[in-house]
Image (cartoon, helix red, strand yellow):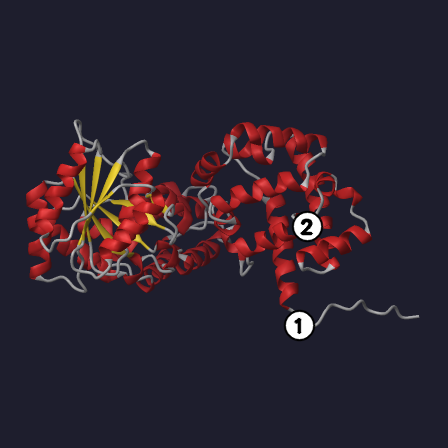
Amino acid sequence: MFDSLTGKFNSVFKSLSGRGRITEANVSDAMREVRKALLEADVNYNVVKQFCKDVREAAIGAEVLKSLHPSQVFVKVVNDKLTELMGPVDSNMYFVSPGPTIVLLAGLQGCGKTTTTAKLGKYLVSKGKKPLLVADDLQRPAAIDQLVILGQQLDIDVYSEDSKDAVKVAKNGVKFARKNGHDVVLLDTAGRLHIDQEMMAEISNVAKAVSPHQIYLVCDAMIGQDAVTSAKEFNETLELDGVILTKLDGDARGGAALSVKAVTGKPIKFVGVGEKLDKLEEFHPDRMASRILGMGDVVSLVEKAQEHFDAEQAEKMQKKMAKGSFGFDDFLKQMQAVKKMGGMKDMLKMLPGMDSQLGDLDFDDKSIGQIEAIVYSMTIAERKNPDILDISRRRRIAAGAGKRPEDVSSLVKTFKRSRDMLKTLSGGKMGMLKGLFSGGMNMGDLGAMMNAGRKIKQRSKRKKPLRRKKRKR
């Protein structure tokens, strides 16, 4: 996400880092490039104009010009202004007592509203709530069936009925929630291909009938300025409480995320960062600004780690690392946790400075699968003690995994090197698993293992087997 914008900002910062001091002239040159980058990212023109003005005024102030490290202070200025542009932080949902809290979701057709309704339901369950999903999109074919299926997958109740009256379904859904002890109602309303009077009249009538406590507009981040325009028009009719941006993971530009708060005055509450039902995140302007500038997002990384890694299990692994008894079974447990966190590449992107170094490295679930295939072909004794893997054992494992002996040897070699490094790291204050729960993290070892998986996958695609070069006599 924001790959293009991140690259442009990094180029601007590099151009300033070699300067002994920052002057009004080179600040103006830098802001010219920033302005160009933001416009190319499809950020609203008026937003770009005001942002550049604010940054320039702050950058040519005495704090930057007299600083011993002016380029670093300039980065901080840009970071602060980006945070202000998208902020303030307002990701919390507010609940009424007694319930249920009624949340209405609106949006254009194709923005991912029905899926977002289900994702929001899953998010609420993780917060200890009992949500009810109401299928009130009576216009799009199969919209009701889609929400019912998603509800079954998540084990969340869905209210639906065979009717063409959206107001009636919404009112009956709220009554059902009260009767059955649901504390939150999520109304999935109908969308249209474009904003029209009929659409606005229907959704306005639904809002008047059930008096929702919160109204969220679901916008497709990939349509850029059109998302901001629709947000503005919806806000004039419904008085929105917030915006949920979907498909942010596929938006390399970032125009909608940077414009919507400034144009509508409404905060971005959540962002969709993937197709899976757990890929809905609270929106934090400061963290997003840090990501855009290539500075990572360690806070979110630690939160993900704490959610998916068991602290007690992590401590046990830490002790194994210190003793040097860390085996392949232990490693697979870490890999599976990494998989749940969104994958290695997503995790590495959250580390400061790593985003620009990843390039085209293919850290994905398939890479993990390559490693799993080899490990699961080992015996229990071999997994516990990889040192016993001689040539004959490696051949047997390769045959069982459908790989080549060279692939097994490569993985074992990388594993042993990583294990030795883990033993060293685990003794310090910044041990890897320890770091997950203390706010710091060293991912080099897992990165090396994922890299081994990537190499195995690349080799498997080759048509001809590798041949050893003959030694010259």
Going by the numbered disc 2, the residue's amino acid type is Ser
Going by the numbered disc 1, the residue's amino acid type is Lys
* Residue 201 location (% of width, % of height): 6, 55
Task: Pick whichever of labels 1 and 2 is earlier in the sequence.
Answer: 2
Q: Quadrant of residue 93?
A: top left
| Label of residue 463 in the image | 1
| Label of residue 377 in the image | 2
Left or right, residue 393 beside residue 440: right
Left or right, residue 146 beside residue 99: right
| Label of residue 31 in the image | none
Secondary element at tag 2? loop
Residue 17 drawn above or below residue 324: below
Secondary element at tag 1? loop
Instruction: Work out whether residue 53 can be spotted.
Output: no
* Number of marks in the rendered image: 2
Report, in whole angstroms, how far the alpha carbon at label 1 lies from the one at label 2: 23 Å
- Name the one closer to the observer, 4 or 164: 164
Residue drawn at the location 38% of the way across and 48% of the way down: 279
- Please name which of the two marks, 1 or 2, marks the residue nearer to the observer: 2
